[in-house]
Image (tube, rainbow, N blue to C red):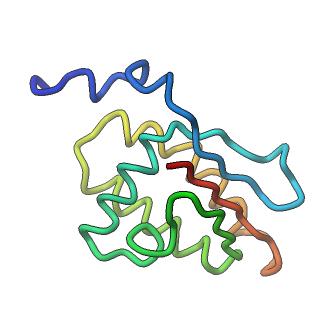
Amino acid sequence: MDLYPDRFIAGTYEDEQPDAIWIDGHADEGLAVPAFVFRRLLAIGAAYHLHYLGSVLEYDEETRLDAVQCRDLVREIEFIAEVVQDPLLKASVVPVLEVVARVSRRAPSAVLVVDLES
């Protein structure tokens, strides 16, 4: 990608405050996510009118999603990974998908917490 090559280098964003996701009651199964990942996911999700990535997840808010909701969120993230040609985003969503999918496979009472900073 010749235009804006710095947008595809992770180091460009290393000074940003990360967002966080974790499994409620299991903080050790959490993940600090570079802020650009959710900024891109939410912007693209809004453009495609996706439910969770387009309207449910918001900045400056902690969102809690149960296992069923996480199944849908997995589909939305996988959809975005298929349609974008952004190698940095595609690589960066892999650990996010792993945590969200882990919740989706647990009991219905399992909860994913998503805390997005502005």
Residue at image position (67%, 52%) is 21
| Residue at x 25%, y 50% (from the top left corner) | 84
In the image, residue 63 above or below residue 8:
below
Q: Residue furthest right?
A: 25
Residue drawn where x is 48% and y is 46% of the image: 93
Residue 35 pos. (x, y %):
49, 41
Question: How many discs mark residues in the rendered view?
Answer: 0
Front residue of this view, candidates 104 and 57: 57
Q: Residue furthest top?
A: 11
Residue at position x 41%, y 24% from top? 10
Q: x and y percent of residue 112 in the render?
A: 71, 64
| Quarter of the picture holding the N terminus | top left
Relative to 102, is 8 on the left or the right? Answer: left
Q: Residue furthest left?
A: 2
Q: Is residue 86 above or below residue 71?
A: above
Front residue of this view, candidates 65 and 86: 65
Q: Is residue 19 left or right of residue 10?
A: right
